[in-house]
Amino acid sequence: MTIKAFLKRTIIVSIFSGLALGADWPMWRNDTGRTAQSAEVLADNLSLQWSRRLPPLKPAYRDNRLQFDAGYEPIVLGKRLVVGSSRDDSVTAFDTETGEEAWKFFTDGPVRFAPVGCEGRIIFGSDDGCLYCVNASDGLLVWKKRAVPSKRKVIGNERMISVWPVRGGPVLHEGRVYFAAGVWPLEGTFVFCVDALTGETIWRNDRSSYRYGVHPHNARAFGGLAPQGYLLIDDETGHLIVPSSQAYPAKFDMKTGELKSFELPAPGRLPGGWFASTPSELERQKLKRRGLLFDKEVNYRVHEDKPHFKGEKGVRNKITVAGREMHFSDGYLDIQAGSIHSMLVADEKLFVVTKAGEISCFGPGLKQPTKHKASKVRLAKGREQGLFLKLDQTHGYALLLGAGDDLELIESLLSETNFRVIVVDSRPEKVRQIREKSLVSSVTGEQLSVIEDDPTSVILPPYFADLIVIGNSTSLDATQLKRVYESLRPFGGKLMTRSGEPLSDDLDLEGAKRSRTGSDWKVITREGALLGSANYEGNWEESWDKRVRGPLGVLWFDDSLSHFKRSPQPKFIDGVMISTPKDWTDETTRTGKVDYRLLAPVFSDVYTGRILSAKEAPALRKSF
């Protein structure tokens, strides 16, 4: 062995010698710096022990700079592999030896970030605005912390979530959990430090969402922290690093929560993103790296016709195991190159997660691997069969207030319409029943989501529901009914209640038209436009809308529609927005001064952001 090789090996061994075999992987990328480094020494010849195919995930955003939830990101604590899901709003634990499911815990919103684990407990956040702590052994709730000012909800990324979702992925350090809630500075954003054992707040920073400064195109305005991404800790500076959506990360004092640095996305700044890490010990010794690392495949943006990026390729897509780098792009054994989303090492095993949602466990010793397959059943059709077949609108959002004594209304809504169904019920056992039934029926959270709350007082956004059904387990007084009616979409939204329920004809509801369907149901249709609102034909003409007044708040958000820069002004007609996307011309193939060509118009719902199906708004489509 040469002197150079000996020294190289000595450095690697010295870096990892203090770490134990069979270690945990207790958080995303294993440690507080998100280095994805492990001292675990794996056996030379690993073989497949078990595999499990989970349903593929749909990320919240199309923009790669915000795709923090493009695939499953498990952690390992002891003999539990634990993984969150934005598909069914759950966290699930599997036995690391067998792959058998140990427990499943549901929340009231998508779980988009990996949990953290410590002292036999699993801690995770949800888009419902809460941080949860459960036992690693059985999934029973230890504590729950609502990290936001109220239970107010919004349509966010096509799901009903808190106005302040927990999208600052948690990081654990010395018995404290750091996380962030809220994504819109004008609504307020919050960075927390809490005690991992009790959930009690050690500090909270709610002062970083209103900062005046320079924005793109030299515009001066208020802006602020918009935390979306995995938090991390820079142990060299003692700073808590909070990724801020498409801006650069902010830095906070870990002990006090005071903001140390943050820059608004001023002109000329390179794009930020959801990912950052610190160098591993090996990288610091071998490559002399310091400071934060970025991945140019994440921090990459084509602005009009030119690419902008920061960082090195592949930083996020590798792990370091006992000094050896393993790149996702290389594949592993029979897992195809390019198909790997994540890898982790724990419990003397290698776990590989594919982009398609398959988790494979490789360990020492030859055995017949167990391949777990999800069982599927079809939804039943009950006595409410045919109730919704005659509706003139079957796309959009349907709200069911109170699930009733059975699941027939839900099953009819799912089988007879294309609605995204949202159920609100206050009975924990009924909520659990619906969620478990949707799992075995392969119904996604986008198709059916359940919120455990009081149907008479739940705080929902206005105008979002194309259909509201009041179940037989819910009774509303006049004040409550008026509040529910506010969530009904103008231009034809329908509210249905059984004939036996009180629905006074003299109740003052703007635009309400009453009717019946069959002998069992009363129907209220919200006809026409909102009082004082007006259409807008574009062309920079004056708007005659008298309804819009400050202060304003977020009604919905998504990036499915992101084509407004330098396009013709969108038009707003009878609750439909008509916008025109662009196809930017590459500078190498451009002819003349044509920067882009306009594509076919897109029709969307102004109240939810939903892109309409080809069969919706036929009259408008003929005009444009």
Image: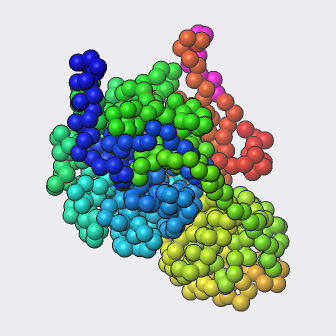
Q: 459 above or below 263?
A: below
Report which quarter residue 380 is drawn in: bottom right
Q: 354 above or below 478?
A: above
**On the rendered structure, is 409 left or right of 222?**
right
> Quick check: can you spot residue 3?
yes
- Colouring style: rainbow
Write the residue at 57% across / 75% down.
432
Whether 594 is among the magenta residues is yes
Where does residue 403 sit, x and y in percent of width and height? 64, 78
Closer to us: 97 or 421: 97
Q: Which residues are magenta?
A: 591-598
Where does residue 270 sit, x and y in percent of width and height? 36, 28
**On the rendered structure, is 56 left or right of 129?**
right
Report which quarter residue 269 is drawn in: top left
Write the residue at 54% across / 38% down.
340
**On the rendered structure, is 224 left or right of 423?**
left
Closer to us: 131 or 517: 131
Helix, strand or loop: magenta stretch: loop
Closer to us: 538 or 290: 290
Closer to us: 504 or 48: 48
Where does residue 422 sit, x and y in percent of width and height? 61, 67
Q: 601 above or below 150?
A: above
